[in-house]
Image (cartoon, coloured by chain):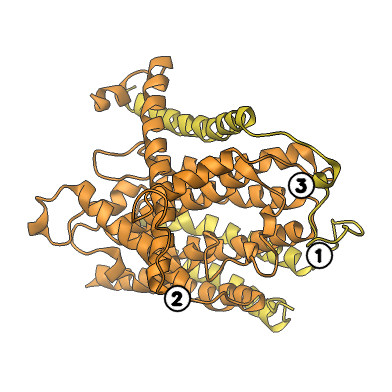
Amino acid sequence: MVEDLLHSQPGILNFGIFFLLATVLLLVILGFVTYAILAERKVMGFMQLRQGPNQVGGRWGLLQTVADVLKLLLKEDTIPKLADKPLFIIAPVIAFAPSFIVIAAIPFTDKLQFADLNIGLLYYIAISGLTTIGMVTGGWASNNKYALLGGMRAAAQMISYEIPLVMSVLGVILLTGSLNLNDIVAAQENVWYILLQPVAFIVFIIASVAELNRVPFDLPESENELVAGFHVEYSGFRWAFFMLAEYVYMFAMASLTTVLFLGGWLPLFSFLDFIPGAVWFALKFMFVVFLLIWFRSTFPRIRADKLMEFAWKILLPIALANIFLTAIIKEIFKLL
Amino acid sequence: MEMLNLYQNNYLIVFVFLCLGILLPVVALFLGKLLRPYKPYDSKYTTYESGLEPFSDSRVQFNVRYYIFALMFVIFDVETVFLYPWAVAYEKLGIFALIEMLIFVFMLVIGLIYAWKKKVLKWI
């Protein structure tokens, strides 16, 4: 049915159907964000030998995030007098919208996916770069010293780590010969790229943590030196959208890592393929999310100067070397 | 025609996602507007500065290094723009393209080393 729909003449009806389906996905993602925040607090709680949320919604605090969101909804909205009002209002939207748009290109299983773009990977990278603009806009519009510093740091960090991120992926593209995410998963039928491209995987994970602005690379919002970085002046739901963007990106980045390096919906061994692809995808996805939470409670925040030097002096040369190593090895295999 | 429809539909989906991505904040903020209290008084709307009266302009001069990193970013991002199609078509291009790309990247690496030696990459 969906096949027919995809092959039909695009029109208002198609738009309507896609809109409904995308709304369902949006609700699923909001559900994920709700429980990802709870999971993060719980896991960090256990790792730090404490309980984590355990009051609202039973012993596991299952309704804690819901209560938090409702509280945010009822907060008074303040826009400082000195702020640049239009930019201040538009910044959370610029930060959030790309985080959701990138998910359009990600294949969850061979059937369950939205847009099957030929340039899927390039699309992801191009769109995800736009969030930086939202952060800088927010920082600048607040007219606050902490916010401006946080915004500048965010921009510097994200452009520095974008390059190793983009270059580490090139190894995968070289081996596949396509930017289509479906082709990339199909090429991992025999061996996952985490085994063929271990260096690329490590560079990618480090750079993606930096792109997500998570600990140990959370300098843009380091709460004990810049108060909260670029969103100091934001309150209520405007602030919530910056946080939402961060967690939706976590969803997108974990999905992308799964697709690129962990074989997407493919089973671990071929005799295990009676388990549906969606389950495999969910398992790998949850592993990556857990890894990100684990990082957060393990590593201390890195110093600003070390952060920039690490991107340019270590990650960039390694990523470049990896590309040419892959190309040369591929050439040698062709000769054999 | 079939392929064209498929292509257009795929980008229609992207457009739908764009609409939803903008619609959600707009709707949520509008709902919030109906629910949240509004009790303004002057001191609520001053800029936050750790409890002090805010002094001097907030749009402070910032470090020129940010600018240099932005320049470096542009150079290496353009490099990746060239690397992407190369990587996709590498299967067909073969060893000649590999050597060409090595020369190209080598020149950029010289630039990186130069910046490194000039201590541009050092953050103070």
Q: Indicate the secondary structure of the residue bearing disc 3.
A: helix
- Within 10 Å of disc 1 (Cα), the crowding (few <14, some 14-19, many 20+) is few
Q: Are marks 2 and 1 on the same chain?
A: no
- Chain A image colour: orange
Chain letter for yellow? B
Q: Which mark is residue B62?
A: 1
Q: Quadrant where the N terminus of chain B lies?
A: top left
Q: Disc 1: which chain?
A: B
Where's residue B102, x and y in %? 49, 71
| Disc 1 residue type (three-letter) | Phe
The residue positioned 72% from the left and 81% from the top of the image is B119
Q: Does B85 sit above or below residue B21?
A: below
Disc 2 chain ID: A
Question: In which chain is the residue bearing label 3?
Answer: A
Whole-angstrom CA distance, mark 2 to mark 1, is 32 Å
Distance between the alpha carbons at the discs numbered 1 and 3: 16 Å
Is residue A228 rendered to the left or right of residue A71? right
What is the crowding at mark 3: few (fewer than 14 residues within 10 Å), some, or many (at least 20)? many
Amino acid under disc 2 = Thr
On the same chain: label 3 and label 2?
A: yes
Q: Which mark is residue A298?
A: 2
* Residue pointed to by mark 3: A141
Q: Position of residue A92 (x, y in %)?
A: 63, 43
Q: Is residue A81 above or below residue B102?
A: above
Disc 2 vs disc 1: which is toward the camera? 2
Q: Nearer the viewer, mark 3 or mark 2?
A: 2
State which quadrant residue B38 falls in: top right
Lower position in the chain sequence, tag 3 or tag 2: 3
Residue A28: name its quadrant: top left
- Circles 1 and 3 on the same chain: no
